[in-house]
Image: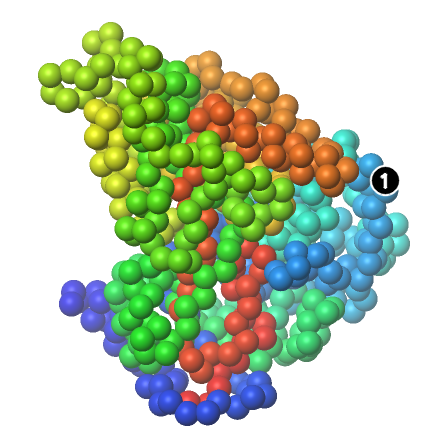
Amino acid sequence: MTTKLKRLALTLATISASGLFLPGAFASEPVKGGTLIYLEQQAHTNLYPPAGGFYPNGGILNQITDKLTYQNPKTLEIEPWIAESWTVNADATEYTFKIRPGVTFSDGTPLDAAAVAKNYDVFGLGNKALKQPVSEVINNYERSEVVDPQTVKFFFKKPSPGFLQGTSVIGSGLVAASTLALPFEQLGDATKIIGSGPFVVDSETIGKELNLKAREEYAWGPAKLEHQGRAYLDGIKYIITGEDSVRIGALLAGQADFIRQVQAYDEKQVEAQDYQIYAPSTRGVNNSVVFRPDNPLVADVRVRKALLHATDAKEIVTTLFSANYPQATSIIASTALGYRDISAKLAFDPEKAKALLEEAGWTVGANGLRQKDGKELVLTAYESLPQPQNKETLQLVAQQWGKLGVKLTVLAGDSGSRVVDDLDPLKTPVSPAMVGRADPDVIKSQYYPKNRDVLRQKGGQSDKVQSFADDKLNGLLEALTAEPDREKRFAIAGEVQDYVIDQAYAIPIFEEPQAFAGAPYVQGIAFESVGRPSFYSTWLAEH
């Protein structure tokens, strides 16, 4: 064990209030008090709420901020929270919310209609002066109107049917005016995030440790939850622990209570000791490999289709993962709203792949690599550190493509050149991608050039793109987020799923959960609709 790991082990041993777990009956009623020791794989980056899509960010924001509405993770219905009620006009261009009285931020300022309006004006329009970007979950936003102290109304330039669900997500956590007044680059400091949630930030060592404490006067949890009032826990201690083996070892030794990012190969040893694996679905765009068609090597749809049919997703899932990682049957999860089963288009067919490459003019050279016009079919991808076993996944994809004479070079996800190279299709023609959200708008978040722009289109996030743009795809994505009729909207979602695969822009591999493990005495763990933990109702049984 390295000196660094020994030091972490000693720290965990010192702060562990629980000691070793001794089997026995647990109390059936929640126990108040105690600090949850939570080991997180990665440090948070920025806690501006729309940046909550990064799971370490969202895992903190979910404890310290409340949302206007609550999406029931079982039914996916939208329920009251900070908003007691709401109305939506027929074409989904106007939304009116009645705000629950008596709610305050932890600095004592009121969470009233004016505060909600201020939050959404920033989330919906951004703030260029402070470099605060527009939220990817809000489309067609125009303005807010404070009707009275407890009533706020929002107006949209075009229908925005996904907005109601968008008020329930991590990226819409409500924060005080003092937080919204800070430039984006200062919001990596958790102590500057003032929310109204059940926990508040007590102290932080940036990049290493974060301590939350329960807010004593908290009394406004989601209206339909059985638990109301103060959180049961006294606090939560987050410790950044990058090494998988150290997180698992600390949990099983009783030095930690709950951990995130449990690899599939560790699940059996956790369950063998009667510890609990949690694997909530992220309900969004599946863990996939995507192409950047601006790169001439993958500009031909026949090449992309060949690589799609050369990818054996079943082998990847059965080799590297567990039953908690279902094989993908579309670009979005089978648990996602608007899902369409297009598994027939994703079939592993190496003979078809060979034929497509030959048809596209790529022949096998003396060195075994496909060649055309003096160029070899050699592609590059960077691993994505947040995604489970992504390096191993890409390496297995590389092996499968290698059988056809296509070389995929997998580079380290922590490489200093990764961020810049990822914006350049010539340097990074292949990329892993996924995003969670329990609404069809998630597809636009993934593919639209003004959002995540995973395909790298002209006019999107990168100025390195020379010419690639897909107006048909972008039109479908715009229609998806502006269609107020539910069935028509789902039909457009299905059309997008078909189109993305017909163009072979993506190779879906598996439905990605968020994998956690907890000690048996940790009770009341809950997750929001895309897999981030909520510790509001969590409690530690005597042990």
Is 204 situated left or right of 242 in this image?
right
Where residue 124 appears, x then y in whole percent? Answer: 68, 40
Asked whether 469 or 496 is in front, the reply is 496
Q: Amino acid at mark 1?
A: Ala
Q: Position of residue 159 (x, y in %)?
A: 76, 35
Q: Residue at the right extreme?
A: 148
Q: Where is the N terminus found, in terms of image quarters?
A: bottom left
Q: Residue furthest top?
A: 373
Helix, strand or loop status at disc 1? loop
Is residue 295 visible from the viewing direction of this image?
no
Task: Find residue 291 and report its horizontal and vertical position in percent.
Answer: 40, 28
Q: Does 298 sit left or right of 76 as displayed?
A: left
Which colour assignment does the render follow?
Answer: rainbow
- The residue at which mark 1 appears reads as 90
Q: Position of residue 541 (x, y in %)?
A: 48, 86
Numbered disc total: 1
Of residues 315 and 65, the one nearer the viewer is 315
Q: Is residue 66 left or right of residue 51?
A: right
Neighbour class for label 1 at 10 Å: few (<14), some, many (≥20)?
few
- Picture layout, residue 405 above or below residue 148: above
Does residue 429 lie above or below 4 as drawn? above
Taking depth in this image into account, of 343 and 493 the one nearest to the observer is 343
Q: Residue at x 59, y 25 (%)?
A: 474
Q: Write down the quadrant of residue 274 in the picture.
A: bottom left
- Residue 1 appearing in the image: yes
Q: Residue drawn at (56%, 51%), measured in percent from left and top?
A: 335
Question: Residue 380 falls in which quadrant of the image?
Answer: top left
Q: Quadrant of the C terminus?
A: bottom left
Q: Residue at x 56, y 88 (%)?
A: 28
User: At 22% from the left edge and 14% from the top edge, which residue is drawn?
Assistant: 363
